[in-house]
Image (cartoon, helix red, strand yellow):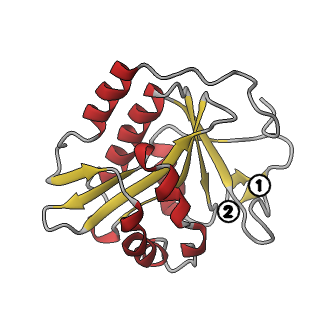
Amino acid sequence: MNRDEPSGRPAASPDPAALAAAESVALAPGPSDLRWRHPGESDHPRLVALVDDWYGGRKVHLAFGRFLLMHFASTSLLAETAEGKTAGYVVGFVSPDRPAEAYVQAGAVNPNLRRRGIGRQLCERFFTLARARGARGVVCPVWPGDPIAVAFHRALGFEPESGPGTMRLYGTLAYPDYEYDGEDRILFRREI
């Protein structure tokens, strides 16, 4: 599919029973002692204060707009420790122009809690919510200079998009200047 054109497929109304079942799975307690919920607009200041540190010092907070939690909360997830500290989050949505595609705008796990399966749980729970809304695939833009994020997405079965405009950056196919000058991105894709 051409990235520049909508799928043309009209969005079907999700089945209420499927949505309720997906919601139940996405917010259920998991193997970790974490609480799962949808983030709200009131979570924005707390999350935006964490993102630069969690992204290794990169200045990414400017891309974490409040509108993301205002408009995409029902498909986004927040994992919290028993003490109420943020363990991780994923902010994503099902594209209104490409309803077979879900898109992850941002996601991260507290660096002190990594390698415990939290990131995988966030993604799998997001996939459940997206599938219930008709998505069959997921797109995740990732900065190619982040080897931890690249390895994580590959471990989850994502593959980098290839084709016109891509080039090998940091050893992975990516789009140079994808967001704007100097902001390259791998577009990782996978079916769900």
- Name the image quarter holding residue 163: top right
Circle 1: residue type: Tyr
For the image, the number of numbered tags is: 2
Residue at the spot 75% in from the left edge and 41% down from the top edge: 162
- When the figure is inspected, residue 34 is found, relative to residue 50, above or below; the finding is above
Q: Locate residue 46 relative to residue 164 in the image: left or right.
A: left
In the image, farthest residue toward the right = 164
Looking at the rendered structure, the secondary structure element under dot 1 is loop
Q: Locate residue 77 relative to residue 81 in the image: left or right.
A: right
Q: Tell me where residue 24 appears, x and y as whole percent.
A: 25, 33
Residue at the spot 23% in from the left edge and 69% down from the top edge: 85
Q: Tell me where residue 183 appears, x and y as whole percent.
A: 72, 67
Structural distance between the alpha carbons of marks 1 and 2 = 11 Å
Q: Tell me where residue 11 appears, x and y as whole percent.
A: 62, 25
Label 2, on which residue?
170
Where's the N terminus, which quadrant?
Answer: top right
Numbered label attached to residue 175: 1
Q: Locate residue 174 relative to residue 145 in the image: left or right.
A: right
Q: Which of 114 and 123 is in front in this view?
A: 123
- Name the image quarter holding residue 61: bottom right
Give the class, few, some or many, for how many residues have Cα within 10 Å of label 2's Cα (few <14, many ≥20).
few
Residue at the spot 31% in from the left edge and 27% down from the top edge: 20
Q: Nearer the viewer, residue 35 or 192?
A: 35
Q: Tell me where residue 55 appears, x and y as whole percent.
A: 49, 71
